Image (spheres, grey):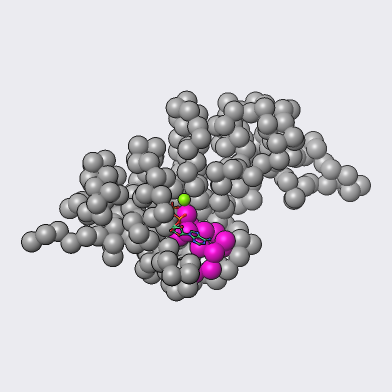
Amino acid sequence: MTNQGPATPTATPLVDMRDISIAFGGIRAVDGASIDLYPGEVVALLGHNGAGKSTLIKILSGAYKRDTGTIFVNGQEASISSPRDAKGYGIETIYQTLALADNVDAAANLFLGRELKTAWGTLDDVAMEAEARKVMGRLNPRFQRFKDPVSRLSGGQRQSVAIARAILFNARILIMDEPTAALGPQETAQVGELVKQLKADGIGIFLISHDIHDVFDLADRVCVMKNGQVVGTARTTDVTQDEVLGMIILGKCPPGAVPGPGAVRAAA
Ligand SMILES: Nc1ncnc2c1ncn2[C@@H]1O[C@H](COP(=O)(O)OP(=O)(O)O)[C@@H](O)[C@H]1O
Ligand SMILES: [Mg+2]
């Protein structure tokens, strides 16, 4: 096997989703999909709108309950039926909307709902800002706007805050659904820097996108979905962007990829 698996073949995947299916009414939104993710790895989940990407990932984040299939986290079968369960396994999702409180600063957002208190039971703003500076210093050293409400921050800075929030609560597995969809080129580059930093820390990232150009350079592997099924999975070094486009559009699996159940059979 040259196309699949981790850089260190003996490593246990952070996440291994096997044979996952879910139907809404009569529609098989996800149909027998398998995908895995290793520490420090970025796996881009690609496919047209409606391919099933968000649904598959919502099963991992506990937002949807799968009909069938098994999820392993660090080699152990995981029981995930709520977002709380998923967080317990170190799985955090950065939603496109980022879910930030706009009128308060970065530190307040990092500790939203889990505020640090002083011995007197009041908010410990000093401790929270110190923690915020520590985690941001590691994630995005250029970030300095600790006193501003996050509504005044740029899209890329807001993304840093949302990711820092996840990291602060020990995320090992990060799901980013269309993270750069609303960002300009400079900000997209900034998200790329964040992703590299997270990788270096051994965090695994599922990066979801309908646009291959957004994610190809960041990803170690791509997994393409079509009509709820996995077309194939490939290392980005083993396939060209055109071949991946062929996977997305035609469901055609190139030689450098491992075919999934959704791959169309080549005509004989
Ligand atoms: N909550 C839901 N109820 C009914 N159908 C849904 C729901 N969520 C997703 N779907 C359907 O599942 C399919 C896959 O959608 P989705 O996972 O959002 O695709 P993607 O993220 O790849 O664009 C689509 O046909 C979509 O309409
Ligand atoms: Mg989606």
Name the outermost residue toward the right: 120
> How many numbered discs sit on the rendered protein?
0
Question: Magenta residues?
Answer: 54-66
User: 115 left or right of 239?
Assistant: right
- Which one is nearer the viewer's eye here, 229 or 40? 229
Q: Is residue 70 above or below residue 221?
A: below
Classify the position of the N terminus by image quarter.
Answer: bottom left
Coordinates of residue 154 in the picture (x, y in percent): 59, 28
Residue 126 visible from this viewpoint: yes
What residue appears at the point 49 percent right and 47 percent down from the top-left corner?
A: 177
User: 265 left or right of 126?
Assistant: left
Coordinates of residue 182 in the picture (x, y in percent): 51, 35
Residue 39 visible from this viewpoint: no
Coordinates of residue 88 in the picture (x, y in percent): 61, 62
- Which one is nearer the viewer's eye here, 159 or 1? 159
User: 1 left or right of 156?
Assistant: left
- Which one is nearer the viewer's eye here, 233 or 249? 249
